[in-house]
Image (tube, coloured by chain):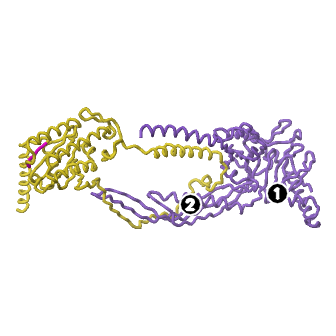
Amino acid sequence: MPSQMTNYQCPACTGPLHFDGATGRLRCDYCGSEFGVQEIEALYNEKLEQSAQAAVQQAEKEEQTAAQQVPGGEDPAWEMEQAGMKAYNCPSCGAELICDSTTAATSCPYCGNPTVLPGQFHGMLKPDFILPFKLDKEAAKRALRDFYKGKKLLPRAFSNENHIEEIKGVYVPFWLFDGQGDADIRFKATNVRSYREGDYQVTVTDFYDLRRAGTVNFSRIPVDGSRKMPDAHMDAIEPFDYSELKPFSTAYMPGFLAERYDVDANECAERAKLRATNTTEQMIASTATGYATCSPVAKQVRLRQGGVRYVMLPVWLLSTRWNGKSFLFAMNGQTGKLIGDLPVSKGRYWGWFGGIAGSLAAILTAALLLFF
Amino acid sequence: MRKKLIALLLLCTAFCLCCNYTAAAETGLGYVTDQAGILSDEQEQALTETAEALTQRYGVSFYIVTVQDYRDYNAAGVDKCAEGLYSYYDLGSGPDRDGVLLLLSMSDRDYSLTTYGFFADYCFGDPNKNLVEAAFLDNFRNNDWMGGFGDYLSQCDDVMATAAQHHLSKDSEPCSYNGIAYPNKTYVYGDLRESAEPVKMPLGMKLLIGIGAPCLIALIVCSTFKAQMKTAKLRTTAEEYVVPGSMALRASDDRFVNRSVTRVPIPKNDSSGRGGFSGGGSGGFHSHTGKF
């Protein structure tokens, strides 16, 4: 059964509103009016609460209906739930939208109006903070074009065709972990000095046992909480500037997609722990200086986990297709850092290899034959 | 009293040595000095002319000295005697006083083949000294003095001629001795006789270096290019998220455990000569000694 959804409409003309990252305000596509986030929030707060309540009631109703029916029966809502999908009605045109169960913000494919599914951020699912987009779609396209530049092994056809199959701004759910790394490491170290004494070369080696123990505090290590997002891409676009975090509001979402988390904090904590313990070990070990050699012989590194925050961070996702393969690029929607794996042209690879090796070989061989 | 006696003895020994060298000096020390009297005047004259010609041609002096007993001059050894004579008479040619001296001591049939000066040492490495020794020893063992000295000079001529063909140089700086120019060329110490050509890198090695090294460089460059194509990587550290100044050490112990000391003798550059003793030489002398 379809459930409730909200779209932000212009108070002046009821046209759809989009969040404009450059100005940090909501802008009407039709009349050009701009509104502050807080202004729209206040306007829509009541509406959102009603929508959320409606969503909860709808969910309860669905549960009751599902309980009365035999699982695996012919109820379409139940089948969609099983498939991880949900159905909503667009508040603008009334069309039925089928979304992933984790989708929190999207746009109607019929009328194009950006819509927010408030039930996705209700109660425990509500993020603590949101980092609004600062860069728009054009900036993402430009960044991709710039990204191609200087890549000597990129196939010419790939960069020339440059057809972006899809580009979307997504608020990706992240968990931010605080914690304190604690390391206790023992090392074996040596210092060596050598000098001449008469007809003998004397080498003196001093052996030491070292111990370093200490703590390092970490603040807001991000780990993405969405299974759809490739972890390598999300890691590589770090860091984000957390000083611009805002208290969460769905008013920042119109015009972008959003997902609620589907990997919980406990599961994500393992990755944060790994990163923190590695850095703790490195930092504590870096204090063992002044020795010719120093190698760890025993270590105990652990992380005392602190607070966890649930935030939505802005990411532009750009996908292209070439030679039957998909290539996904991710850009930090705040800083503009773009990453992604590019195809390697074998022809160019061997061309460069042959060119460098051939020219150097010609010069070097000629020199060797002439002078040695 | 005992110290005074030792000092007096040392003084007397020094005086005697000085007198002995002085006695030899009075008789002069030409290219050929036959104190032992084993050569006729004609033979001495012929050998002198040959040695003088070689000296003028190559810029390295060649000497022949015979004594009855080297101990009359220096009891420390036949090589020390030869070195003493060389120094005392200020022998040799050119700024480095390059020269080769063959000393025969007849009483115990000892000989010393001594070289001095960079260029002479360079040309007469151990292998070439062995060649020269091989040339004269059989004659001397048969008491063929003239034949032995003739072969000595002849072999020296060969060695120097080969050196000239190889355009020897000192420390990669072109040098010239008595009009013979020696531009930069590779030279392996003591290897003149074995190789008629300058020592060259084998062709296989040249090709290996000429092709292998560029391929390796190209591989490194292309790998760098390839690495630029893959930028999506998982992070394993979190240094950006360290709270500034938050690192606190609660234990920092450095404990000395023990010390090991190894003493390795420094190898000397001496090498043994065939049929005799090769000494690194004091004061720049290099000698081969033995019996004939």
Side of B31 relative to A12 (left or right):
left
Q: Most prominent secondary structure in the magenta stretch?
A: strand
Q: Please check whether the numbered discs 1 and 2 fall on a single chain.
A: yes
Q: Which chain is purple?
A: A
Number of numbered discs overlaid on the protein picture: 2
User: Disc 1 on helix, strand or loop?
Assistant: loop
User: Disc 2 on helix, strand or loop?
Assistant: helix
Lower sequence index among marks 1 and 2: 1
**What number is the disc on residue A113?**
none
Residue A177 position in % (x across, y down):
67, 58
Tell me, yes or no, whether the highlighted magenta stretch contains residue B155. Answer: no
The magenta segment is: B32-36
Residue A165 position in % (x across, y down):
78, 43
> Residue A8 appears in which quarter of the rendering?
top right
Query: Residue drawn 66% across and 61% down?
Result: A306
**What number is the disc on residue A122?**
1
Side of B194 relative to A319 (left or right):
left
Residue A111 position in % (x across, y down):
89, 43
**Quadrant in which the N terminus of chain B appears:** bottom left
**Disc 2 sits on a residue from what chain?**
A
Q: Amino acid at mark 2?
A: Glu
**What number is the disc on residue A281?**
2
Q: Which chain is yellow?
A: B
**Quadrant in which the C terminus of chain B appears:** bottom left
Q: Nearer the viewer, residue B161 or A175?
A: B161
Determine whether A284 is above or below B131 in the image. below
Residue B60 position in % (x across, y down):
22, 40
